[in-house]
DNA sequence: TCTGGGGTCCTAGGACCC
DNA sequence: TCTGGGGTCCTAGGACCC
């Protein structure tokens, strides 16, 4: 509890409306005003819906696509497989636009960023409106802007901006009279507050706390005793104390996971090896992008939770003798673990690799078993591999182990072209 | 018969977020 | 047939140490 910042702060939260669906629509003007959904990896579940789709299919978020597809087609819904290359690129444009408005932008997720507006003079509501309009003009994305004295309040303001009648995508709680705030917050279920999920909502309801205003009025010390320090901080943040600051230099990641379900079941060790190799390389690539090294790796394989056969899960940690960022070493280590946990006769659905105990520099010691810290030579090799894959396309160069089976890849039946990241995907002029 | 008390590390599980 | 993937933080309890 040492990081409470006593000086008055003002933060804005900007997030894109139905981000994935909007990205798809930006390049398909013919779909404007029509229902669009985006599916998870493997075309498994609905993970994004635009406004029009929400009206027709209100409760379809996270439902398996195979269950709702017929109904969706009947309503003229267009479905897309996830196209993360496109979303990442649109996200970068969005963030670049936000940087015009504040020197401090904290990227919170692919479609959400906090801006530090502390000390800015003038009408913040007007500033919020300007941010919203500029993003619309420069990227084609619709966004909501919420402003408040803490991150929790900025989040809540954002919720109001997007969902409460009378707000057109911008809400500034920092300058709103308390009377009006009370009216607004009394009409928001307590689960609208950042940090209050379904479990906490149920517990709070039992104690008579049903709306956001009531939670704001709660005694922080009692909340701490009953619920712990996290909710106590939330209550304080609702009252304008900034316990979480907005900053660019986030602490390093603590773990990196790459895992995914297969398009079809695998039983064969060789095919599983291809998948595990991919995840080891993929996780290592993302780790190098953050400038980190790992000294522990975890490999897991499992069949499905919904299977007739009993749920099978196997996973094992391997402590590495010294921190590394080398794809080759990590892939070898991952395959070594895989061979130990693999059991024949199981219809595997998913595999994953987790890198944990991340550190910011390579180890020095050489160990006895031939596993050495990265050499300058291996560092150059990794840098070359990354730059080629970045320049051309991910997966242009990969380790041989990945190529031994290619049956495990994702189903992506409704993939849009990569409009912004590949020449072949550029929209054609009419 | 008496059965301390403080500290650390690790793990599992719970809750939340996008 | 088909049910996402990737993270964080906190707490409690056990093992172990002095």
Image (cartoon, coloured by chain):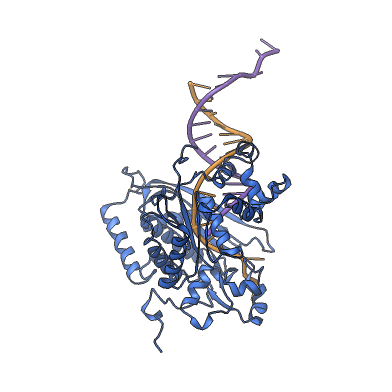
Chain colours: A blue, B purple, C orange
- At x 43% / y 66%, what residue is drawn? A88
Q: Nearer the viewer, residue B9 or A329?
A: B9
Residue A288 appears in the figure: yes
A133 sits to left or right of A60: left
Quadrant of the image occupied by residue A160: bottom right
Where is residue A198? Give x, y as percent. Answer: 66, 53
- At x 32% / y 42%, what residue is drawn? A365
Where is residue A118? Give x, y as percent. Answer: 42, 50
Where is residue A86? Give x, y as percent. Answer: 44, 71
A337 sits to left or right of A199: left
Residue A408 appears in the figure: no
- At x 49% / y 49%, what residue is drawn? A149
Q: Nearer the viewer, residue A147 or A191?
A: A147
Marker count (numbered): 0
Task: Please determine whether, in this image, residue A178 is positioned above or below residue A259.
Answer: above
Task: Please determine whether, in this image, residue C6 is positioned above or below residue A408.
Answer: above
Quadrant of the image occupied by residue A222: top right
Task: Please determine whether, in this image, residue A367 is positioned above or below residue A129.
Answer: above
Q: Nearer the viewer, residue A342 or C5?
A: C5
A274 sits to left or right of A201: left
Where is residue A186? Give x, y as percent. Answer: 66, 53
Q: Quadrant of the C terminus of chain A?
A: bottom left
Q: Nearer the viewer, residue A313 or A283?
A: A283
């Amino acid at each position: 509890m040492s990081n409470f910042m006593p000086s008055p702060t003002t933060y804005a939260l900007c997030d894109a409306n139905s981000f994935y669906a909007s990205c798809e629509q930006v390049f398909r003007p013919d779909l404007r005003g029509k229902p669009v959904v985006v599916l998870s990896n493997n075309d498994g579940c609905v993970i994004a819906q635009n406004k029009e789709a929400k009206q027709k299919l209100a409760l379809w978020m996270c439902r398996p696509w195979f269950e709702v597809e017929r109904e969706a087609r009947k309503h003229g819904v267009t479905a897309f497989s996830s196209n993360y290359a496109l979303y990442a690129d649109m996200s970068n444009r969005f963030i670049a636009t936000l940087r015009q408005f504040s020197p401090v932008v904290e990227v919170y997720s692919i479609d959400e960023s906090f801006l530090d507006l502390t000390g800015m003079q003038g009408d913040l509501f007007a500033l919020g409106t300007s941010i919203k309009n500029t993003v619309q003009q420069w990227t084609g994305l619709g966004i909501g802007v919420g402003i408040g004295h803490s991150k929790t309040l900025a989040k809540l303001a954002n919720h109001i901006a997007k969902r409460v009648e009378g707000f057109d995508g911008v809400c500034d709680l920092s300058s709103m009279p308390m009377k009006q705030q009370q009216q607004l917050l009394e009409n928001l279920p307590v689960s609208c507050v950042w940090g209050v999920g379904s479990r906490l909502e149920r517990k709070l309801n039992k104690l008579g706390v049903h709306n956001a205003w009531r939670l704001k009025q709660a005694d922080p010390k009692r909340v701490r005793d009953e619920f712990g320090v996290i909710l106590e901080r939330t209550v304080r943040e609702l009252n304008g104390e900034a316990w979480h600051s907005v900053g660019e230099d986030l602490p390093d990641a603590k773990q990196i996971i790459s895992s995914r379900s297969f398009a079809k079941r695998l039983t064969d060790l060789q095919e599983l090896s291809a998948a595990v190799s991919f995840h080891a390389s993929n996780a290592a690539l993302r780790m190098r992008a953050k400038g980190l090294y790992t000294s522990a790796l975890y490999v897991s394989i499992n069949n499905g939770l919904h299977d007739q056969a009993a749920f099978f899960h196997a996973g094992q940690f391997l402590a590495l003798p010294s921190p590394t960022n080398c794809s080759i070493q990590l892939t070898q280590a991952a395959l070594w673990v895989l061979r130990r946990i693999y059991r024949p006769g199981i219809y595997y659905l998913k595999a994953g690799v987790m890198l944990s105990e991340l550190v910011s520099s390579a180890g020095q010691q050489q160990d006895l078993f031939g596993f050495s810290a990265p050499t300058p030579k291996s560092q150059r090799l990794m840098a070359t591999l990354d730059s080629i894959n970045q320049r051309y396309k991910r997966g242009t160069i990969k380790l041989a182990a990945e190529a031994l089976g290619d049956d495990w890849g994702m189903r992506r039946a409704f993939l849009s072209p990569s409009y912004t990241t590949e020449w072949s995907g550029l929209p054609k002029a009419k």
